[in-house]
Image (cartoon, rainbow, N blue to C red):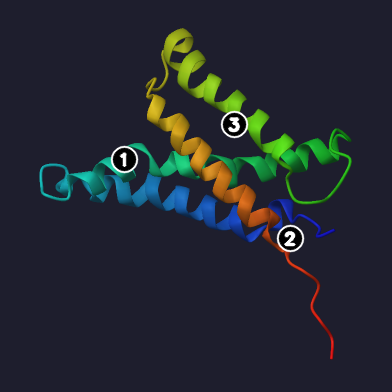
Amino acid sequence: MTRFGYLHDRLFWFASAAYALNRLILKSHLGALRHSHLDFVWSFFHSHFDDLLLIPAALPVVLWVQRLLGLRKHDGPPTWREVWPHLLIWSVMCKFVGPYWLHIGTPDPWDIAFFAAGGLAAFAWWNHAVRQPAAVRL
């Protein structure tokens, strides 16, 4: 079985860097596109790009902590049984508890779709090497 990299995973670093780039630079510089024919670009980067990155950027940290605490018993890539509960918990926390109880954030149901799309893509990425057949030696 392929060993999962946790905090050394390339997708984790890419997602974390893309999140920081979007939050610190892109959101503030794409405002000019808001009232242009490229309004969809501004809307995507302002409202949904970070949502795509939630699972690839946050799940490796959570799984690493779970491994340190002995709650995760293997070092393989995240299984679907590890991805979907986190997707469900973060969706409830970010789109129900936060907006309605803590008055933080916006209850946008599209965000949950982007959480799921990012989670599905990350799951496919992390498990791609596991599904590859062994190389044939000549």
Foreground mark, 1 or 3, reads 3
The N terminus: image quadrant: bottom right
Mark closest to the chain's N terminus, 2 or 3 = 3
Mark closest to the chain's N terminus, 2 or 1 = 1
What's the distance in space between the residues labelled 2 and 3, CA to CA? 23 Å
Q: Amino acid at mark 2?
A: Arg
Label 3 element class:
helix
Q: Amino acid at mark 1?
A: His
* Residue on which disc 1 sits: 46
**Frontmost residue, 67 versus 135:** 135
**Frontmost residue, 95 versus 7:** 95
Q: Amino acid at mark 3?
A: Leu
Foreground mark, 2 or 3, reads 2
* Number of the label disc, if any, that sits on residue 131: 2
User: Whole-percent x and y of residue 131?
Assistant: 73, 60
* Residue on which disc 3 sits: 87
Q: Are marks 2 and 1 in contact (CB under 8 Å)?
A: no
User: Whole-percent x and y of residue 62?
Assistant: 70, 37
Relative to 115, is 67 on the left or the right? right
User: Whole-percent x and y of residue 86?
Assistant: 64, 31
Label 1 element class:
helix
What's the distance in space between the residues labelled 1 and 3, CA to CA? 21 Å
Residue at (38, 30) in percent of width and height: 110
Residue at (77, 38) in percent of width and height: 65
Residue at (73, 45) in percent of width and height: 78
Label 2 environment density (alpha carbons within 10 Å; few <14, some 14–19, many ≥20): few
**Frontmost residue, 118 versus 104:** 118
What's the distance in space between the residues labelled 2 and 1, CA to CA? 35 Å
